[in-house]
Amino acid sequence: MRRALALAVVALAVARPGPVAAHAPPSEATVDRYLKVTPMGDRIRLAYTIVFGQEPGRRVRPRLDRDRDRTVTDAEARPLGEDLARQVATALSLAVDDRTTPVTWARVEVGLGTPAVDAGALSVDLIAYLCVGPGRHRLRLRDDLSLPDLGSTELTLESAAGVEVVARSLGGAPLTEDVTTWTGRGGPLATGLDLTYQAGSDAARPRDGRCREGGGGARAARVWLFLGATAGGAAIAIAARWLLARRRRPGASARPRPPG
């Protein structure tokens, strides 16, 4: 039901295609998408944004206003974000160091700007983190998302401090620019982005607890140390109870001596 609502909303929003704008203000008549890939010291950050332009936004909002009070609340907008998040996750194919990696969104937000039902543009912002340690890594990404009459697509590669890009290609051709834009369906992301980078030991690592240091090193060691200590303490407690029970059994070797 919710997926059908999202598909209906997207189809309604892009019913009348028109000129597209570059990444900055929303377009007047199309739905645009923006993907930013940021390799860091302990992760690869993916930021995926779908922007409904002014006219598409005006068509979308009445469909979201389920109680017909002329205001779109965050709760009413949430199903659109969740359904588009599932569609994008299904359309994305990711492999890190030749290992298939599923997409789990850490953040899904619908940006209304204003809650008025007769307002214009709105956006859906999706953030994911692919946790990897420092060193050399290869990311391969394909995007098969299909939106009717899609306007522009913008791909941005943004390296964090301490990260060196070793090689990169898009659609099978060398990628020479940090920002690439095209219009219409398909495009080079259908063939894929291929990115190899080197993250130094000093590369940026946000202290947000989302990715374990070194792909699981220090934090994992602390977890196993805690589990080991807990298991050891439990074993000692069990042994102590066994000895106490043995002392209390009739005929046990350790008996209190009679007075005198």
Image: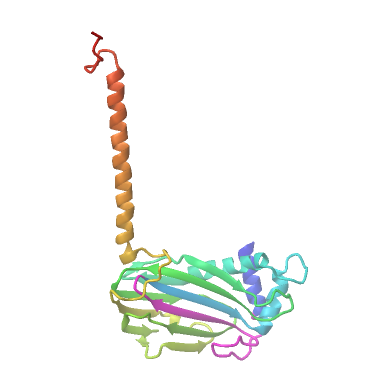
Q: Nearer the viewer, residue 224 or 51?
A: 224
- Viewport quadrant of the C terminus: top left
What is the magenta range? Answer: 14-42
Q: Nearer the viewer, residue 205 or 118?
A: 205
Name of the residue lying farthest toward the left: 253
Image position of 125 with respect to 240: above or below: below
Dominant SS type (magenta): loop
Q: Does the magenta portion include 24?
A: yes
Does residue 25 appear anywhere in the picture?
yes
**Image point (62%, 66%), residue name:** 78
**Image point (28%, 35%), residue name:** 236
Dividing the picture into quadrants, the one containing residue 137 is bottom left
Image position of 219 with respect to 249: above or below: below
Dividing the picture into quadrants, the one containing residue 219 is bottom left
Residue 75 lies left or right of residue 183; in this view the side is right
**Image point (45%, 88%), residue name:** 180
